[in-house]
Amino acid sequence: MNELKEILLAEDDPNDVELTLNALEDYNLSNSVQVVHNGEEAIDYLHRHGAFSTIPSGNPALILLDLKMPKVDGLEVLRHIKSDADLQNIPTVMLTSSREEKDIIESYKLGVNAYVVKPVDFQQFIDAVKKLGLFWALYNEPPPGSIRKYR
Amino acid sequence: MGKKEFTIYERVILVQLVVIVLIMAVNVFITYRINWSREISRMTMEIGQVSRRLSSQISIPFWILNENETQKILLQEIKNPYLAGIAIMQDEVLWTGVTVNQEGTVKELSGAEKNVPVTFYGTEMPPIKVFHTDNRGKAWELGDLVLYTTDTPVKKIVASLLWQAVIQTIALIIGLNILTIVLLYMFLNKPLKQITNTARRIGDGEIDLQVEVTGTREIKTLATAFNKMTSRLRESIAELDRYFTNSLDLLCIADTKGVFRKLNMEWESTLGYSIADLIGRSFLDFVHNEDIDRTLAELQNLDKNESPHNFVNRFRQKDGTYRWLEWRSFPYGNIIYAVARDITARVWNENEMRQMNEELEQKVTRRTESLLMINRELESFSYSVSHDLRSPLRHIIGFINLLESECRPVLSDKGKHYLDVIANSSKKMGLLIDQLLELSRTGRLELKKTRVDMNALVREVLNELSDVTSKRTISWVIDDLPETSADPLMLQAVLTNLIGNALKFTRTGENARIQISSLPGDNKNQTVYFVKDNGVGFDMKYQDKLFGVFQRLHSSDNFEGTGIGLANVHRIISRHGGKVWAEGEIDNGATFYFSLLNESKTDTDFTLQRDNSHE
């Protein structure tokens, strides 16, 4: 039995959420995905604040961050994660439409683990997200203390 | 040089002394030679007469040995100044005699003193025999008469003659000197005094005076030279005066208090005053109030005799307005020579220029700011395109795919066709957006030039395009390419585009042939690379449209494309300072050339030179 590790998906666009979840469905990865809709929620979730205070504590094995989000954007969330001693080891991947060089440079400066541009082509998009999920949620050994779910 | 230099007076006196001594010596010598021998012969003659007379006079008293009588005769003769003593010798023994010593004392020498040795003063003459002839005529030798002579009287006479000669010489020289002085005064001093007076009067300002050319030749020469000098002086004064009068600058002479003493006409024409208005007034009266302190400080500096330098202040005109004057002053004793130039126009021009420059600078700043703003807006626009436009497109494509997989079986054929059209159009739009972003990025990104191995780059591009090439039979001609300096990523985009085009436009024909090669450029730093194909080619009359954005020469039915690729190539090569052009013929292939500068050191970004018509 494969253990599943939790993925946190921070994405404001419901279409993108649906497409991403659709892509992750194939390997039954979608069940382990926690979706938040902006940066603020992402940070709240990671610290179990507000609406998330009842959820048992533990870090996700992977954070997928959109760049442009209302309230607190992806780069700020990334900055928060990488400067917090409890969170900084969580593998964090930018999953974004932006191929802007300054975004890429800034993300790597902040310590992003990967930067993936969402392909416009559906098949390529499905492919990319699937591979991402497979790699980080199944094969990669997350830092100790990550939430594991079992299928 | 320790040798003493003699003044002219010392020389003249020395020479005169030598001449006087020489003349005197000659005079004395000649006087001595003539008079001495004459006096000596006179003395000899007289002594001869005395001795003859004596020998006859004393013959009788000697004969009778009457000593007293003999003494009388001797005393009579001894008065002769040439005689110092007379001795009458009998058998070589003194019988009787007389002597005179140097003091002139006469002493008789008698027979009683015969045995006492007698000293005679003077020169002993040869003895003369004294005879007595008796009545029978027989001569008896009685003894010898010896005379002692002295030349003291000769010496006295000659000495007095010599003195006379000396006095005569001195008198002559004094006389001559007096004569010379008188003559010099008459012929030299008088005309010299006249010239001196004239010179003094010229010095006092009577510049037109001349001296009379009279007197000796030397004086005439001097007077002529003097007149020539004064006329040259007049000429150069007139020359200076012409400059002073006609100068375009304001010239003036003032004292250290700033009071005008002399001004040229320019003061009238520039400032409207008459010269008489200004003379005697201090120029400080006319200086602008705000400039007066600076001007006073400047005057003080002049007092310290500091080197002349330029100074600018405002000077009141007769109509009450001010003009800018630039001064240069030369202090000389208690006088200041000053030159002023009216630089009002220049000052105004400078002010105007400064104002214009300031305005221009402000304009440039505003323009730059607005350009920067536009640039920022463009950047945020492309950022929006990148993110906000792609996202919905991705959703369309995604959900069409989902729709297709969910509902394709239940759709009618028409419905399926519509779905396909929507899917294709969406994909095409995605491609367009991506390429537009690419184009905007090649314009904005910084050029990172390095040495580029073109052969390796071509291999990489071919590798990248292997999806297409592996399915086709293409005869490649790839020559060895020289390396260059460029941004490798951008250059790769160029090659991908050109080789991709070559592949695309040879697709329809058989025996596709693609050549990648190079040529030497116009100069040795330039290399021209080209990609040549034998594809469908193009009509040369449309060649200027090849590199424009969205410009296409082929319909998308035959060859897909967005019309952005070559525009991107053009932009990249332009930014590298190179050129891109193409040759082609319909159905006979096309060749795309691009030139690059092969300079390792230059790192110029040619962004500013790029042709903005393709934006």
Image (spheres, coloured by chain):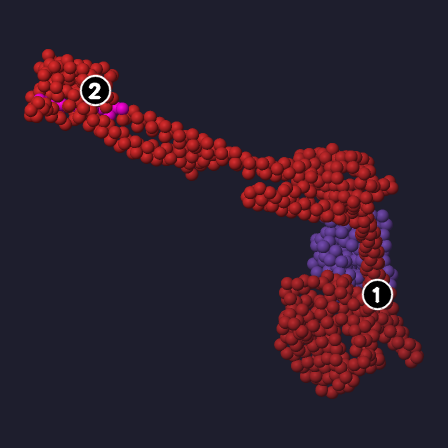
Quadrant of image for the N terminus of chain B: top left
Residue at 63%, 65% in the rendered image: B600
Label 1 and label 2: CA atoms lie apart by 178 Å
* Disc on the earlier residue, 1 or 2: 2
Q: Which residues are magenta?
A: B142-153
Q: Is disc 2 on the same chain as disc 1?
A: yes
Disc ID at residue B390: 1
Between B25 and B210, which is closer to the camera in this rendering?
B25
Drawn colour of chain B?
red
Q: Residues within 10 Å of mark 2 (few under 14, many from 20)?
A: some
Tell me the subunit letter for badge 1. Answer: B
Drawn colour of chain A?
purple
Q: Position of residue A93 (x, y in %)?
A: 75, 59
Between B492 and B573, which is closer to the camera in this rendering?
B573
Q: Residues within 10 Å of mark 1 (few under 14, many from 20)?
A: many
Compared with B465, B361 (above or below) is above
Between B362 and B422, which is closer to the camera in this rendering?
B362
Residue at 76%, 68% in the rendered image: B571
Compared with A46, B432 (above or below) is below
Task: Classify residue B150 by image quadrant.
Answer: top left
Disc ID at residue B77: 2
Q: Position of residue B11 (x, y in %)?
A: 44, 36
